[in-house]
Image: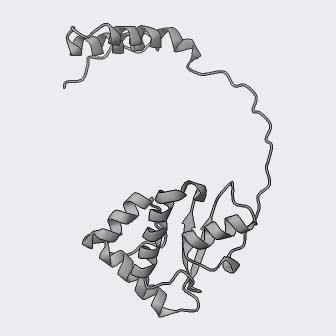
Amino acid sequence: MQDKAPDILITNYSMLNIMLIRSVENDIFEQTKQWLEQDRQHHIFHLVIDELHTYRGTPGTEVGYLLRALLNRIGLEPDSPQLRIIATNASIENDEESLDYLEQFFGRDRNTFSILPGEQQNFPTPEHQPNPLEPYKETFAQIDNILNQSQNNDEDAVIEEAATTLANTLHLPNVDAPPR
């Protein structure tokens, strides 16, 4: 990834911040910048932000500036026609307050945003499926008891006793505990 910039980069703001600081990541941003410069009409950079509503207040300001630093690093302005922003958010409405927020967060004119409302879906509750571990509930309780009462015992002996309890329940042959 550091040698050949990825077509898709999935990250979070903490790692993005680190990547923008570390020199070892320079080629990622430089290659992306060169790719954008090669064809200003057809090469489009897509920025996808999930759960946009979590970036409010001071943390939102910091992430907004981080995104501006990213765009600057790859040679784009927030209002660049080569930039497409897709954001998911359950609380954005097509109103002045939401448009103010989008404009401030992304540094783009409010008229460039299209808010596509979602529709709440009601899905049927799945039929209750039996828990496949239910038959082993008692065994897990026994193992938990073995582990909780073993503070002063030999650790290897405790692990072996817990493994033997599970093996017996599953009708498996007893296997020697692996060496540590």
**Left or right: 159, with 61 as reference point:** left
**Left or right: 170, with 161 as reference point:** right
| Quadrant of the image occupied by residue 2 | bottom left
Q: What residue appears at the point 31 percent right and 76 percent down from the top-left corner?
A: 26
Q: What residue appears at the point 34 percent right and 70 percent down from the top-left corner?
A: 20
> Looking at the image, which is closer to me, 131 or 166?
131
Q: Relative to 166, is 3 above or below?
A: below
> Looking at the image, which is closer to me, 26 or 143?
26
**Left or right: 88, with 128 as reference point:** left
Colour approach in the figure: one colour
Q: What residue appears at the point 35 percent right and 15 percent down from the top-left corner?
A: 163
Query: Where does residue 53 sit, x and y in percent of width and height?
Result: 60, 56
Query: Where does residue 157 sit, x and y in percent of width and height?
Result: 24, 11
Q: Which quadrant would the N terminus be assigned to in this image?
A: bottom left
> Looking at the image, which is closer to me, 75 or 39?
75
Q: Relative to 113, is 174 above or below?
A: above
**Left or right: 156, with 170 as reference point:** left
| Quadrant of the image occupied by residue 134 | top right
| Quadrant of the image occupied by residue 179 | top left
Q: What residue appears at the point 80 percent right and 43 percent down from the top-left corner?
A: 122
Query: Where does residue 42 sit, x and y in percent of width and height?
Result: 58, 88
Q: Relative to 70, is 91 above or below?
A: above
Query: Where does residue 56 sit, x and y in percent of width and height?
Result: 55, 58
> Exactly how many numbered labels are in the figure?
0
Q: Which quadrant would the C terminus be assigned to in this image?
A: top left
